[in-house]
């Protein structure tokens, strides 16, 4: 697993939103696409933050007017990222260490190019590991 790169397992169909997107619209995007996060990007596709299902617990608990609240109010801005050339072991270690379920994959020139999720990693492991003996 050491020599397998993030690019091999990352999802490339990343859903992005602008910082001024309303949280209600971001939630609908997540529900419609069956995803657990949206990446917040600027006009050049550069990462500004991430909004995850965990953030929605805070949104509901604080009961602010959701129909007028932009995602920039709740998104995480200290986002840990990966590059397509990082090893999946390094990405997995970061996810376990920080209890993350999503890590945006960033290219210096193109901005956000993908997302590595716990589902991506589990899918990879299930394809390469032999079943355990019974």
Image (cartoon, rainbow, N blue to C red):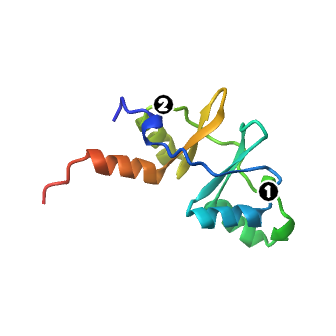
Q: Is residue 26 visible?
A: yes
Seen from the viewer's position, the closer of residues 12 and 120 is 12
Vertical position of residue 47 compared to residue 65: above or below: above
Q: Which mark is residue 21?
A: 1
The N terminus, quarter of image: top left
**Image location of residue 50, percent across then percent down:** 68, 49
* Mark positioned earlier in the residue sequence (2 or 1): 1
Density class for disc 2 (Cα within 10 Å; few <14, some 14-19, many ≥20) is: some
For the point 81% across and 69% down, the residue is 66
Mark seen at residue 86 = 2
**Which element is circle 1 on?**
loop
Determine whether 96 is above or below 89 in the image: below
Residue 64 in sight from this viewpoint? no
Residue visible at 73% across and 71% down?
A: 61
In screen coordinates, is 114 left or right of 120?
Answer: right
Pick the front one: 49 or 109: 109
Q: Which one is in front, 105 or 93?
A: 105
Q: Residues within 10 Å of mark 1 (few under 14, many from 20)?
A: some
Residue 39 position (above or below residue 36): above
CA gap between label 2 and label 1 equals 31 Å
Picture quarter with the C terminus: bottom left
Residue at 71 percent of width and 65 percent of height: 58
Above or below 25: residue 37 = above
Residue 11 percent coordinates (x, y): 51, 46
Q: Secondary structure at mark 2?
A: loop
Q: Quadrant of residue 89?
A: top left
The count of marks equals 2
Residue 13: x %, y % from top left = 56, 48
Q: Position of residue 82 (x, y in %)?
A: 55, 35
């Amino acid at each position: 697993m050491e020599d397998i790169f993030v690019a091999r397992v990352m999802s490339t169909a990343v859903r992005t939103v602008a910082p001024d997107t309303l949280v209600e619209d971001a939630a609908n995007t997540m529900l419609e696409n069956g995803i657990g996060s949206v990446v917040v990007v600027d006009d050049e596709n550069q990462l500004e933050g991430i909004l995850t299902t965990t953030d929605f617990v805070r949104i509901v608990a604080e009961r602010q007017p959701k129909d007028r609240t932009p995602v920039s109010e709740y998104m995480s801005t200290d986002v840990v990222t990966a590059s397509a050339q990082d090893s999946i072991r390094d990405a997995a270690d970061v996810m376990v260490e920080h209890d993350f379920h999503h890590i945006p994959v960033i290219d210096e020139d193109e901005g956000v190019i993908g997302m590595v999720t716990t589902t991506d990693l589990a899918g990879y492991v299930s394809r390469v590991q032999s079943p355990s003996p019974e």
